[in-house]
Image (spheres, grey):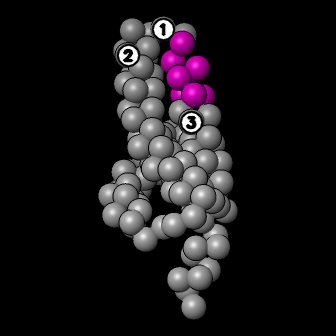
Amino acid sequence: MWRGIVIHGVPLIVAIGAALVLLPWIMGASAIDGEAGSRGYTVGVLALFLYPAAYQVLIVAWLICRWQRWSLGRIFAQLVWVSLLLFAAAMTYSLVQLQAYLQSTAL
């Protein structure tokens, strides 16, 4: 039971969090200037939009495979985690690109 909660719960919680952060991220776009900041913002928007969408598609495909008792279900469960890792990498890149802007506003 705990294994199922961890395997399916963590990507779900991250997808919900990403969907909730998307609107404030978009609203903060007008304050960002500069090439690196703009690139970081764009990568962040794409990651925040594409991860929940990819999660929805992959989890529905996993459920269909499980319902039909197909052996592809394990692949879709692994793809959910791969998309989570790609999302984490994209958001890390985005925050690194926005680091100068974030440090200047913190002072």
Q: Which mark is residue 64?
A: 2
Q: Amino acid at mark 1?
A: Trp
Q: Amino acid at mark 3?
A: Ser
Horizontal and vertical percent for residue 42?
A: 50, 50
> Magenta segment: does it hold 64?
no
Q: Quadrant of residue 106?
A: bottom right
Residue at x-position 41% and y-position 62% = 29
Helix, strand or loop: magenta stretch:
helix
Rendering coords of residue 57 (x, y %): 40, 26
- Element marked by disc 2: helix
Mark earlier in primary sequence (1, 3): 1
Q: Residue furthest front?
A: 34
Name above or below for residue 59 compared with residue 26.
Answer: above
* Residue 77 within the segment the image draws in magenta: yes
Q: Amino acid at mark 2?
A: Ile
Circles 1 and 3: CB distance less than 8 Å?
no
Whole-percent x, y for residue 21 in the image? 39, 59
Is the C-beta separation of discs 1 and 2 under 8 Å? Answer: yes
Could you give the CA–CA distance between mark 1 and mark 3, rounded to whole angstroms? 21 Å
Residue at 54% in and 10% down: 71
Q: Residue at x 65, y 48 (%)?
A: 89
Dot 1 falls on a residue whose secondary structure is: loop
* Disc 3 target residue: 83
Q: Whole-Å distance between the Cαs marked 3 and 2?
A: 19 Å
Query: What residue is shown with label 1?
Result: 70
